[in-house]
Amino acid sequence: MYLYVVPHREECRKAVELVHKLGLDDIEVVDIIERRITSWNLATDLGTSLVPLLEAGEYIIAGYENVKSYLENLKSSRTESTNKAADEL
């Protein structure tokens, strides 16, 4: 999974903080300025240039509130799966 951000934007900073807070280490944070990715590239390749932008397999999640909701649900489902697996042992 990739989280595309512009570091100086508040919503992007909050999204990066949330990734770290939730311990979602498999999400790669991509600074689009540092990587020289233009908004045109994002829009052409992923269908939108709204950041923060999460590319999660076949899903594209744009905007902080949408990204936040997806990440919280992802963390919750992973926690439930881990707990279920532990119960089965």
Image: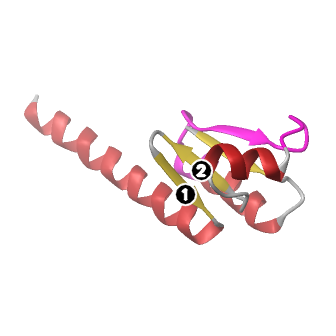
Q: Give the mark, 1 or 2, whose residue is nearer the N terminus.
A: 2
Q: Residue at x 67, y 58 (%)?
A: 48
| Quadrant, the N terminus | top right
Residue 54 % position (x, y) = 59, 50
Which residue corresponds to mark 1? 61
**Of residues 45 and 25, the one drawn nearer to the viewer in this rendering:** 45
**Of residues 3 and 80, the one drawn nearer to the viewer in this rendering:** 3
Q: Between marks 1 and 2, how big is the CA–CA gap?
A: 5 Å
Which residue corresponds to mark 2? 54
Q: Residue at x 34, y 44 (%)?
A: 78
**Of residues 81 and 44, the one drawn nearer to the viewer in this rendering:** 44
Q: Contact, CB < 8 Å: mark 1 with mark 2?
A: yes
Which amino acid lies under the numbered mark 1 shown in the image of this protein? Ile
Seen as rendered, the residue at the extreme front is 44
Which amino acid lies under the numbered mark 2 shown in the image of this protein? Leu
Picture layout, residue 50 above or below residue 19: below
Residue 29 % position (x, y) = 70, 40
| Quadrant, the C terminus | top left
Residue 85 % position (x, y) = 18, 34
Q: Please give the range of residues in magenta.
A: 19-37
